[in-house]
Amino acid sequence: MYTKAFSLSIEGRNRTTTEPKMTEAEPSNNSTVAKPRLVICIGDIHGYITKLQNLWSNLETQFDPQHFNAATIIFLGDYCDRGPDTNKVLDFLIDLPSRYPNQKHVFLSGNHDFAFAAFVGVLPEPQNGVSFKEGWNEYEESEDREGWYKGDGYENMHLQGRRWAGHIKVRFNTVKGIEYKGSIYDAGPTFASYGVPHGSSDLLKAVPDDHKKFLADMVWVHEEDDVCIEDEEGIRHFKLIAAHAGLEEGKNVGEQLRFLKAKETHVPKIEALSGRKTVWDIPKALTEKPIIVVSGHHGKLHIDGLRLIIDEGGGFENKPVAAIALPSMKLVRDTDNLTK
């Protein structure tokens, strides 16, 4: 029985440590099993190219080149907004497969990336003849306050694209304690990184085709088999599910996975990309397997058994971008001072 696991929760500077019980997983016989492959999950980047470059350098320094160059790298989403360099961040990510051809790269969509994709028109069309416009009604009471986009092409735009490029009337975000940057998504710096004013339809021409393809190809959920965690009791093998915000409790997990893999865009809000309390915990059905569930999104670093939330930075300029490496459960940040 797997009864001991590192548990960590960080919000700002508060840290607590517990030892939650975890469901059973069989240990490996280390004498007959090769060293487990390296799986690295990287939290929200939010347009900070220097943080991304420093984190990547630290990861290369931290791990043996043979294992790093063959690693599975799962990016947990939110590549754009808040920071100044979305354009350069996407260039960096798009180049990774050619620079590291033996790595496996997974690019999850975050809620910010989903909205970016909606604005530049690369989301799949809704199924069953439903239009994006039908999704506006549920949130129409927020249209005036959030200043939804009404420029060229808005008539058949997903709700989140309109919110992303809108001009929010309230200047100060009381939840985060900072001023909004253009829209409720803080998309102003993303527009600026492509050399156009916030909310301008000129962004559709300014975003290069390879960036649009990247946004179109992002996955909403990823399943990875045979991911290992190693502790004093040995090496244990798990399945891993990655979704930017998480999976909903109280809903059939199989149906959620089907919906996310199909990229069904008829709903105005994708809970697995943008939910909060509803997706914080591992759904009960997955605790019985057991399955690792990893996310970013929440603006916190929270490790509780097999629930991994890796978003220490939250898009704040003065907070780090973090990654977690399995099987060691080692945390690596862009701010770490590592030398080869």
Image: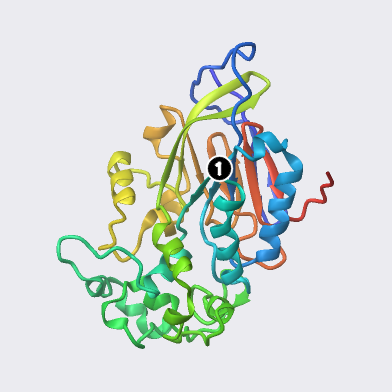
Circle 1 sits on which residue? 308
Residue 297 in the image: state x and y as whole percent.
52, 57
Badge 1 crowding class, 10 Å Cα cut-off, few under 14, some 14 to 19, many 20 or more, is many
Q: Image point 47% across, 43% down: which residue? A: 281
Residue 109 in view of the camera: yes
Q: Is residue 48 above or below residue 23?
A: below
Q: Nearer the viewer, residue 94 or 20?
A: 94
Q: Is residue 166 above or below residue 82?
A: below
Screen quadrant of the C terminus: top right
Q: Nearer the viewer, residue 259 or 153?
A: 153
Q: Is residue 184 above or below residue 269?
A: below
The count of marks equals 1
Residue 53 placement: quadrant? bottom right
Residue 51 in the image: state x and y as whole percent.
69, 61
Residue 131 in the image: state x and y as whole percent.
21, 71
Residue 44 in view of the camera: no
Q: Nearer the viewer, residue 255 or 113?
A: 113
Q: Is residue 325 above or below residue 124?
A: above
Secondary structure at badge 1 equals strand
Q: Which coloring applies here? A: rainbow
Q: Image point 47% across, 83% down: which residue? A: 168
Residue 266 placement: quadrant? bottom left
Three-letter amino acid code of the residue under disc 1: Leu
> Could you tell whether 94 is left or right of 328 in the image?
left
Residue 134 in the image: state x and y as whole percent.
22, 72
> Could you tell whether 314 is left or right of 248 in the image?
right
Q: Image point 54% across, 52% down: which residue? A: 296
